[in-house]
Amino acid sequence: MDKLRIVGGRRLNGEISISGAKNAALPILCAALLTSEPVTLRNVPQLNDISTTVRLLADLGVKVTQEAGGVVHLQADQITNLEASYELVKTMRASILVLGPLLTRFGQAKVSLPGGCSIGQRPVDQHIKGLTALGADITVEHGFVVANAVRLKGAPIVTDMVTVGGTEQFLMAAALAEGQTVLENAAREPEVVDLAEMLISMGARISGHGTDRIVIDGVERLHGTDYTVVPDRIEAGSFLCAVGATGGDIMLRNAAPDTMGATLDKLIDAGLTIESGADWIRASMQTRPKAVGFRTREYPGFPTDMQAQLLALNTVATGMAVVVENIFENRYMHVPELMRMGADIELDGHTAVINGVQQLMGAQVMATDLRASASLVIAGLAATGETIIDRIYHLDRGYEKMEDKLQAVGADIQRLRS
Ligand SMILES: CC(=O)N[C@H]1[C@@H](OP(=O)(O)OP(=O)(O)OC[C@H]2O[C@@H](n3ccc(=O)[nH]c3=O)[C@H](O)[C@@H]2O)O[C@H](CO)[C@@H](O)[C@@H]1O
Ligand SMILES: C=C(OP(=O)(O)O)C(=O)O
């Protein structure tokens, strides 16, 4: 298993190019199942979750070719298999997003229940409830969701909570359903909006995306498209937390600051000087950060996917911060690892209280999930001495060439291959 070795204490200075958003690219790749015509996607990040999705789509019969620079060509004109196997689904929850497209276009699908994930239980009951409301007959058998329908029929869907994946599932399923679907309590995340825009570019009739009420008028068929994925707001936010913790001055290119309001507001509160234009963010940090409390919320609130990284920044800040994680019940596994590096954190259920320390110390730590890994990188960059991060396959799921990008702005970080 690869590890990262970081020698901390260097300020970060220079430019980083932000990749396409993993969490937009994953549903958008699945949406290629909705048409027999060619689909070209651009700005697709090169990371392990994308390779897994490409393997899954290819296993269903989708022809996939990839070009350098994040261009993926897909054509689902000869689907040979309507079953997503456990082997392909187990590492990645987003695989459940092939269910709606297969069901709505082919009338049946069998998808392995996604494996248990370290940040919480993450059931798919709302996905099942919504697709059932659209007329699907769904059973869960031997670890598989088995779904059948003659043709899905538009219907109102109200989920019990705001669900990003659920909203994406229903957008894709309803796009080819007969009649109108109204999603109440819909997720407003930029990645949901990006998927909706991609579907519209395929001929779908969708309005209200970006609000909590989305209306989809089903069409008979969708056509091919050439679509560019939105920049990754979580990757951008992770680099901003890194410069906040180490000090320095970085320019993020190909970013989407208009999707990052809550994150940028908190970083400004922490003392970063931030300027931005349509597709760039410049951040400079010349002092020690100030502690900033926050609560994770659905968009446009502070994203749970930035919790670990901003928490890491708080470990070296002046003052005390209270953090509340409201979305996932088990998303603090980075805390004991950060404490191994000298962080002062008290955990009580969903609340973490962080007293900033003058200096973290490098240590051997273990990555436990994707954003937890990023928080350990940030801590390692700010710490004195050497940090070794084990199990970085979690990081590789969701960040494209993170160590190369950090090296380019002056970090002492290397991958130790094994
Ligand atoms: C690939 C992708 O885009 N992943 C993101 C997506 O995950 P994902 O789409 O899995 O997250 P959801 O928005 O669905 O989950 C929100 C909450 O609802 C619960 N829930 C969800 C569905 C369901 O059927 N039943 C249920 O109980 C979840 O356990 C969680 O507590 O949104 C999360 C919340 O912003 C992010 O952290 C993930 O990075
Ligand atoms: C939790 C995440 O991803 P996933 O939903 O794919 O596990 C994430 O991107 O932070």
Image (cartoon, helix red, strand yellow):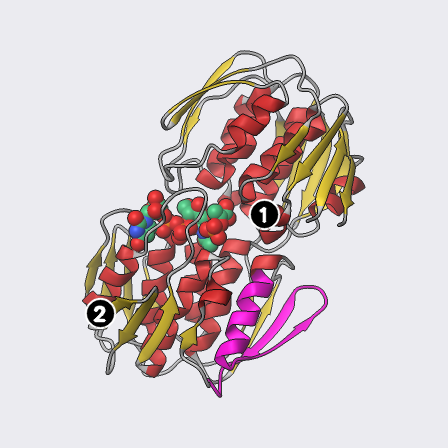
Q: Residue at x 78, y 27 (%)?
A: 10
Residue 116 percent coordinates (x, y): 41, 51
- Which quadrant would residue 58 be assigned to in this image? bottom right
Badge 1 amino acid: His
Q: Tally the marks.
A: 2
3D distance between C-alphas at marks 1 and 2: 35 Å
Query: Disc 2, ligand 1: is the CB inside 8 Å?
Result: no
Mark 1 beta carbon near ligand 2 (under 8 Å): no
The magenta region covers: 50-79
Residue at coordinates 69% horizontally, 29% vertically from top-left? 380
Answer yes or no: is residue 29 visible. Answer: yes
Q: In this view, does 67 lie above or below 359?
A: below
Name the residue nearer the viewer: 381 or 35: 381
- Residue 86 in the image: above or below residue 248: below
Residue 134: mark = 2
Q: What kind of residue is marked 2?
A: Leu
Residue 106 coordinates in the image, percent (x, y): 35, 82
Q: Residue at x 58, y 12 (%)?
A: 318
Does 301 sit left or right of 354 as displayed? left
Q: What element carries label 1?
A: helix
Q: Do the residues labelled 1 and 2 touch (CB within 8 Å)?
A: no
Is residue 362 covered in magenta?
no
The disc, 1 or 2, on the residue closer to the chain's N-terminal end is 2
The furthest residue to the bottom: 78
Residue drawn at 47 percent across, 60 percent down: 90
Residue 284 showing in the rendered view: no
Q: Which sits in the foreground, 360 or 118?
A: 118
149 sits left or right of 65 in the view: left
Q: Disc 1 marks which residue?
A: 394
